[in-house]
Amino acid sequence: SVVCVSVWVVSVEPVQESRLNPDPIPLLSVTPLPPFSRCTVPRLKRSVVGCLPVLYWLPRYSIWDYGMPDLISGISVGIMHLPQGMAYALLASLPPVFGLYTSLYPALVYFFFGTSRHISIGTFAVLSIMVGSVTERLAPDRNFLVMLNGTNLTEVNITARDSYRVQVAAATTVLGGLIQVVLGLVKFGFVGTYLSEPLVRAYTTAAAAHAVVAVIAQLFGLSTTRFSGPLSLVYTLVEVCSKLPQTHLPTLAVSGVSMVFLIAAKEINSAISARLPVPIPVELITIVAATVISSYTYLNGNYTISVVGEIPSGLAAPRLPDASLFKEVMGDAFALAIVGYAISISLGKTFALKHGYKVDSNQELVALGLSNAVGGFFQCYAVCSSMSRSLIQESTGGKTQMAGMASAVIVLVTVLKLGPLFQELPKAVLAAIVFVNLKGMFKQYYDIITLWRSSKVDLVVWLVTWVSTLLFNLDMGLGASITFAVLTVIFRTQLPKYSVLGHVPGTELYLDMETHREVREVPGITIFHSSATVYFANADLYLEALKGKSGLDISKMIIYKRRQEAKQRRRDKRAERRARREAKRQKHALRAPEQKPGVFSVEEAAGHWKEPGGGDGDKEESLGDDQRDWCGRENGTVFVMPTTPRTPDDQCSWEYLKGSKDPDCATLGAMSELQDGDTTTLGSSSEDTLSRELDKVSLGSLGKWTWDIHSIILDLSTANFIDTVAIKTMRNIFHDFGEIDVTVYMAGCQMSVVEQLELGGFFSESITKGRLFATVHDAVLHCLGHQGTSTPSYEYSLVRDVHVYSSIEDTIWKTVYCFEQMNHVCKYVIAGDAVQHQTLRTLTEV
């Protein structure tokens, strides 16, 4: 039921004071909510039709167009329901009549709630074997052994065992149906997408192997114990092989004849199917013939061949499931819910795509859940769509779900009136039907060859799913398979392909330079591309790949730069201290010129070094005296020596050296701290030295590294989200490359990514939104224009390109780039909500 409530907001607002009444009067104002929050008749109708799709297509149903095709299709599918229902009940370790119940009630429920027109809901081999694993685990034969009267022998109480197994199967089915309904109501229909096609096909192939091992005992007439848990398939197969000498030959003969007849008849049916209006009901003919032969030859009494036994007439009354079993079958019920939905939705979407209609995944999950939940109250076990019956329903001309209703009527008539006629049907015939029907699943082993040629990763998923399902139980195998499939996705996103893009001449395309020969490198620009989004699992790898592709070892370069800046600061501090001491000495010398200075004066000492116009002999004599004078007036380990002669305006350059007492020994190569140029050249004026500022050290000026990259463009077109770890990594990339004078830009960011960057505090004064560009080509044009130069070898086909940029705020900024033949750039920025064509043409002409 749908309840619609129209909500109105009632607010009390005081009005302004009036002249007559100074007290404010409260005024009731009724404000309706927006239209989307109110209930209307069309919205109510859409909600009801969405919950009950039968109300949409049944009033439009045309008996003349669809009646006869649906009837023929329904009869054909109903005939298949009879043998498959009873046969698959053996896989579930249940009496055959419960397979007929399972073919009846769920199909009726799906008629009202389903959206697919061609799938046939009922028993399926994979789900039957999964239910059988649960019933065998919770109700093994050893729990129902009874003593024979007057003897020490024991036998299995089959009646009590089957009754409890029916309760277990019903509880598992109801719980699985409730899980499906809840997932559908919360719009969790996309859960089936996590089961990829290779995974589902490998899982069903392995489940077919479980089914073969389960019925092989029936084919050979053996009495074996069905194991559960890990390696249950291996244990069961070992027990069957150990009991092969005890094979019941009459049962083996019946199985062999039935299998030969079924295989031959199916092959003939496939060969002449194009000439027949409906396929030949081979399975129904087989069970009818086997029942007649068994009744007249008394196979059960004369040859002790096991038969179906008593099939009660009529319908069983509904019963509440045993809720105490829910906690024991929770995992199995969840596995049944997921696998059944995945199989049904894959078939439904296949037929919908072929016939041009839409299947609602969430409504399908609800419909399948209701089919299981309601069916569980009538002692049914888990159902889903059957591939063989669905193909028959579609190929015989079925148009709507009315074909499913017709097939349910066939099963209903059989349960009410014809059930007792199949009491003498040998179980070996049903086992042969199961074995032959699994042929289609065995053909899926060809997937190995196909996947080997197309995708090695999908092949690994297929093999891991197959092996895990075989070795573990079906529920544990499904969990292991899904986990491995998700890990492959994580590994592929964690280890994507990183590449450097180049420009395709004459276009605005940028492709991988390693795989495309026609692309050309953009001079001075590195365009870095990742095939996957950037998030916490691959953020560090993204940074390392960027360093490798750009050829810049950022870590070493920044460390080297830090060391050089630290050395430069130490040198400047020493120079300042020396300059202050020298200024202090000069000031003291001016105050006491008659005293012999304890701290020598630079200007005074320089006066004796060389006078203008002096001869060579005087120079050498003066030089010798001065050198002796210098040696006697040392200042610790710092020596001040003139590097240039005094100029006519009394200016002289001095060099401060750090070393031993002998100035001749104080060379640059003799000290490790001076190897990087630990010299300071000062003028005679100390004020110039004191006013000197520390310039920023550039790695290019240091001469250790040279590169021709001035810009890096990060192509983020493949990123659909970005987390906090990736935001920090991007911020570090902008900062680190900025340290070496390389500007970083982003291109191709989706709107959601930009919003996440804003929320993560990525943008700042140093990293503005001007670093964002709509395409890589726009970023390249900006980088070339920002540098102010162009490269003759890099030509663009478009002389004038007009690019419109849309910023994150409300304002739209348009940037027009005009590239002229004289290799210079003219840039015009226009702000506003729109740019008229005339304005653009005028700017282009200018």
Image (cartoon, helix red, strand yellow):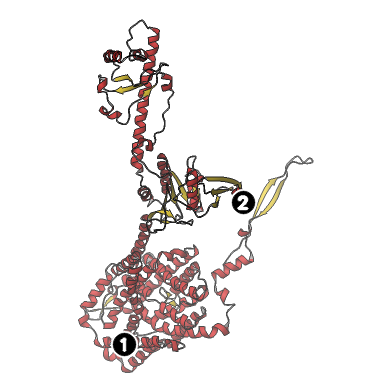
Quarter of the rendering containing residue 481: bottom left
Type of the residue with mark 2: Arg
Image location of residue 535, percent across then percent down? 41, 52
**Residue, disc 2:** 841
Task: Note whether residue 409 is visible.
Answer: no
Residue that protrudes farthest toward the top in the picture: 594
Residue drawn at the location 38% of the way across and 54% of the way down: 498
Q: In the rendered image, which quarter contains the N terminus?
A: bottom right
Answer with mark 1 or mark 2, whichever residue precedes in sequence.
1
Residue drawn at the location 52% of the way across and 71% of the way down: 358
- Residue 633 is left or right of residue 34, and the answer is left
**Residue, disc 1:** 260
Q: In this rendering, is residue 492 above or below 418?
A: above
**SS for tag 1?**
helix
Image location of residue 62, percent across then percent down? 58, 81
Mark drawn on residue 610: none
**Most foreground residue, 28 or 504:** 504
Type of the residue with mark 1: Val
